[in-house]
Amino acid sequence: MEITEVRIKLMEDGDDRLQAFCSITFDHCFVVRDLKIIEGANGPFVAMPSRKLTAHCPRCRTKNHLRANYCNHCGLELEPVRAPAGSDGRMRLYADIAHPIHAKCREMIQERVVSEFYAERERAKQPGYVSRYDEVYDGESVEARTAASPETSRPRKPLPSKEPDAGRRHLDEPAPEPPPPHMRQSGSKASSPQEPARDDFGAGIFDD
């Protein structure tokens, strides 16, 4: 396995410990996003993409962060949760989503990403610099990247017509004239038994 591409997104606030986000591509075919480059005591290091660890509320079973004092759903006061401790003995509040499983792979990612981080900082000093972090990858369409977004998945309202009077056009058109009534002259007979004349309506009801 080989890291074939690294993209860096530098943070504007250089005083914060979080220095940049990055994405890495393996063998031109698999991308891992949202790695973090953090300034540590011995220099920058790479943190894997992670999620917050949660615990269920005993009343409504809603997930809450381990440091939450009250349930986000029902408001119940939560008891302190003893989170698992990490290798350094501190409480673990986050869990890695993707991570290397042995030291050799971790060192390979660390060296490549940190090296690219320093190079990106030099490129950022050039006029017209633009980060490639948000660019679309080869073979990946914009529709595929935005399909899961809540904003783009909502049904859109139809756009109004460009013609200003399109909605009132039917008011300006003359209404069609109604057909003439089927009245027969006095003394004439109905054309057929199925179409009785209007002046014979009810005739014969009281005849013997």
Image (spheres, rainbow, N blue to C red):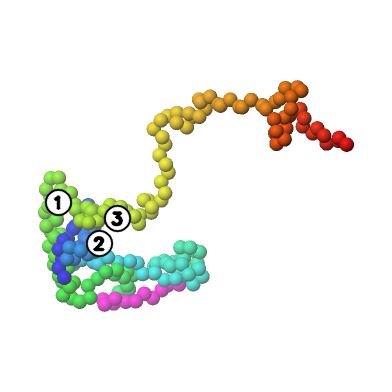
The residue carrying mark 1 is 124
From the viewer's perspective, is 93 left or right of 140?
right
Decide which of 31, 115 is in the foreground and name it: 31
What is the spatial separation of the Cα atoms under label 1 and label 2, in whole angstroms? 21 Å
Look at 41% across and 30% down and name the residue there: 163
Look at 15% across and 63% down and name the residue there: 4
Using the image, tell me which numbered label, if any, was put on residue 113: none
Using the image, tell me which numbered label, if any, was put on residue 33: 2
Quick one: label 1, few (<14), some, or many (20+) residues within 10 Å?
A: few
> What secondary structure is marked by label 3?
helix
From the viewer's perspective, is 191 left or right of 112?
right
In this picture, which residue range is highlighted in magenta? 79-89
94 lies above or below 204 = below
| Amino acid carrying mark 3 in the image | Arg
Query: Residue 60: x percent and y percent?
Result: 50, 68
The residue carrying mark 3 is 145
